[in-house]
Amino acid sequence: MPVLFITDALIFFLVFMVSCFILYARRHEHLRAPWRQVVRSPLAMSSAVILAAYILVGLLDSIHFHPRMPAAGSDEIINSTEIMSLLDVVTGPLRTRNEKTYSSPLASHLYAKEIIELPDGSQIRDYPRLLYGGAHLSAPEAGKRQDILQRVFSGLLLGSTLSGLFFGIFVLLSGRAGRVSFTAEAMAIIRRRKAIPWHAILLTLALLVITASVTIVLASEYHVLGTDKVGQDVLYQSLKSIRTGLVIGTLTTLVMLPFAIMLGLMAGYFRGWVDDVIQYLYTTLNSIPGVLLIAASILILQVYIANHADEFTSIEHRADMRLLFLCIILGITSWTGLCRMLRGETLKLREIDYVQAAQAFGVGNTTIMLRHLLPNVMHIVMISIVLDFSGLVLAEAVLSYINIGVDPTMHSWGNMINSARLEMAREPIVWWSLTAAFLFMFVLVLAANLFSDAVRDAFDPRIRTGFE
Amino acid sequence: MIAYIFRRILYALPILIGVNIITFVLFFVVNTPDDMARMNLGQKRVTQEAIQKWKTERGYDKPLLWNSNTGGAGKLTDTIFYRNSVKLFVFDFGRSDSGRDISYDISQRMWPSLAITVPGLLLGLLAYITFGLILAFFRATYVDIAGVVICVIMMSISGLFYIIGGQYLIGKFLHLVPISGYDIGPEAFKFVVLPVLVGLIGSIGASTRWYRTIFLEEMNRDYVRTARAKGIPEQQVLFRHVLMNGMIPILTGVVVLLPTLFIGSLVMESFFAIPGLGSYTIDAINMQDFAIVRSMVFLGSVLYIIGLILTDISYTLVDPRVRLE
């Protein structure tokens, strides 16, 4: 029984739009040429592989459904009320194998001491064994280190084999397509003689596969990144947070894009009073400090949700509503910059001959804007989309931290950091939740930054002429 | 010049009216005063009398825009919009929902905010310009590449990491300064050090990279080539020509920030328990105090608009080619 959240629908709409755009860009040389430059940059393509991995996890986590399960007391199969995503299915036991409270990464014992009842009836105060982490070991003190080393080794082996296999198949297919022998093709890739930096792509992919294999082999018996306060697996939380980060980073732009483009083009093209009104609109919105507007709006939303509790069927729907609302508010506070840039560019473009010619031929205003102006400002739109992304992902964490971000029940890096920071004073320190959240966020933002730099260099004509 | 400033202030009025209407719609149309009362008094089992009393005490029992029960000017003035929004124009913030005088609170709390933001801005400028110039001077060498790589890595790390890391380091190992809190007088210094440093480190990556781009742009200009051709040493070119001209976009970018220094930083103040205007707003959000949030939104907008006007004036000061008319 599938469930469609509003943000899910928007994500799939976004995927559809991006696919359409790719098809469009393939047929237009002025868009193809800069993208070709991006594709030939090794750093950008390595980042793209990492981003693709994040997006894959995010997409898996965006397909929601009610799982089917046997009804209590009978053999009949019914839909559970709980909502799961495909990612929950893929990660399998990570979701359900909850411990009692904190446990450090790869631990076999709980973080805190408890009173344990021994078989002979006496009681001692000690660190109890975990329910799942390292439960397969009979004597964890002696055998854990060796067991972990064994698992890391077999994970490395598995990952390398998979990567090697993939490399072989890739070289075989690409060699056959180019009608060269297997060794010649392999050497061409290794010696970096291909136009597309396959060596970088394949190397990043191999590293990714090896990391994933080691993690998977370890995760089958351990909590690789430990567990949090309520005993939930931190690795699972970090993976679930990916979707939230991606949604904030992309949907915000999607929400604001139509307004920014339409108003920016109109202001620059029509000038006069239209320009005045639109300028007034964005100056007004811009003059409200962003954080304050977000804070005020979230405060308002909280009151609305509290007073209309019956309109939300489940906690998940409520959290989803808040996520969408946050995207819209972030969009409202961030569209003005793009709108101003588009206005400026349109003011320049409308004086150029081809627009004047179209006007002289009696082409309608809407057609001129769509056919002649929009394609020529697309590069600005694209640069702004990729540049905004990493900032928005980072903003999510900060906003959640001061309680004006996503719903507290939603998995997000901000919420992970927020709940973990109070444990900093503990001895020994609970560091794994924070580290995991920061690490996942850092890798995503770094990849996004490197990728967006490449896109900007390729599309921004000013910089291109500046360094030639 | 005077005429220009006067006109700009006149232009600012409709913008402030717009801000006012937006906040008013946000606060009173989406949720009725009844909703707010219920939220403030607790959700369950709130009697209608209690709600009425809460509203009357805070003046939320009036009609929103038009009061037909009274005569004359009272039709317009005896409404929530007039009482809560129009008065903001003369900076009469009124009382918060918990009964405190907002204007007094603001005048008290802006000093701790300034104590953090002003040193932060000055030290930041010094650091960004220095590093930006160094990277521009060593452009296209390993120093430059390494610097840019470090910048990209530093700007990819969440600001929360620097804050939590800084507090942990100081609190656990160094014990040099308190990790949070504030004190008035000279004692304030030791409370200010950590937030300022953390803020500096957190923003140094992005800012240095941006300043480097500005300086590099200047370096490709004709006058720099002419200066080099005349045989002026590279150091002098860098400081006399590149730095001076690069200061134009930098200064004007800073001037727009100046008035907002009063507001402080929401994030930093709530982390380091600085009793400034930022944490004032955060507290108001957490206590659901609508009057304070509304006042802060308005104050923020006013300061931003002042910043825009100051930016225009500063353009004429640093760049003689720009004339205001």
Image: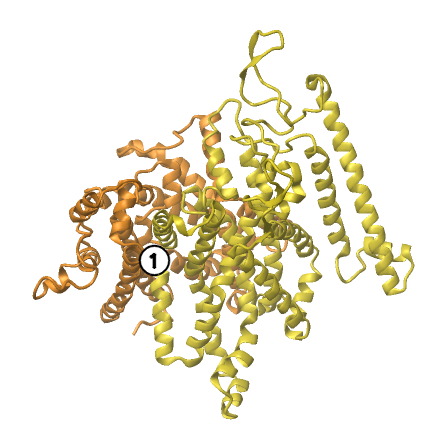
Query: Considering depth in this image, is A271 or B189 the residue closer to the camera?
Result: A271
- In this picture, residue A432 sits left or right of residue A345: right
At a point 27% along the width and 45% down the height, the residue shown is: B38
Q: Quadrant of the C terminus of chain A?
A: bottom right
Query: Considering depth in this image, is B257 or B124 the residue closer to the camera?
Result: B257
Residue A353, percent from left and from top = 53, 86
Determine the image quadrant of residue A177: bottom right
Amino acid type assigned to the residue bearing label 1 in the image: Ile
At a point 45% along the width and 68% down the height, the residue shown is: A259
Residue B154, percent from left and from top = 54, 45
How crowded pointer 1 is (Cα within 10 Å; few <14, some 14-19, many 20+) is rated as: many
- In this picture, residue B13 sits left or right of residue A89: left
Residue that protrudes farthest toward the left in the picture: B71
Residue B279, percent from left and from top = 33, 42
Write down which chain is painted yellow.
A
Q: Name the residue under label 1.
A: A288
Residue A41, percent from left and from top = 69, 59
Chain containing the residue with disc 1: A
Determine the image quadrant of residue B64: bottom left
Query: Considering depth in this image, is B185 or B272 the residue closer to the camera?
Result: B272
Identify the hue of chain B. orange
Q: The residue tagged with tag 1: helix, strand or loop?
A: loop
Tell me how many marks there are. 1
Residue that protrudes farthest toward the right in the picture: A181
Please say whether residue B167 is visible from this viewpoint: yes
Q: In this picture, is A132 found above or below A213? A: above
Query: Considering depth in this image, is B313 or A134 the residue closer to the camera?
Result: A134
- In this picture, residue B34 sits left or right of residue A130: left
Please say whether residue B209 is visible from this viewpoint: no
- In this picture, residue A38 sits left or right of residue B87: right
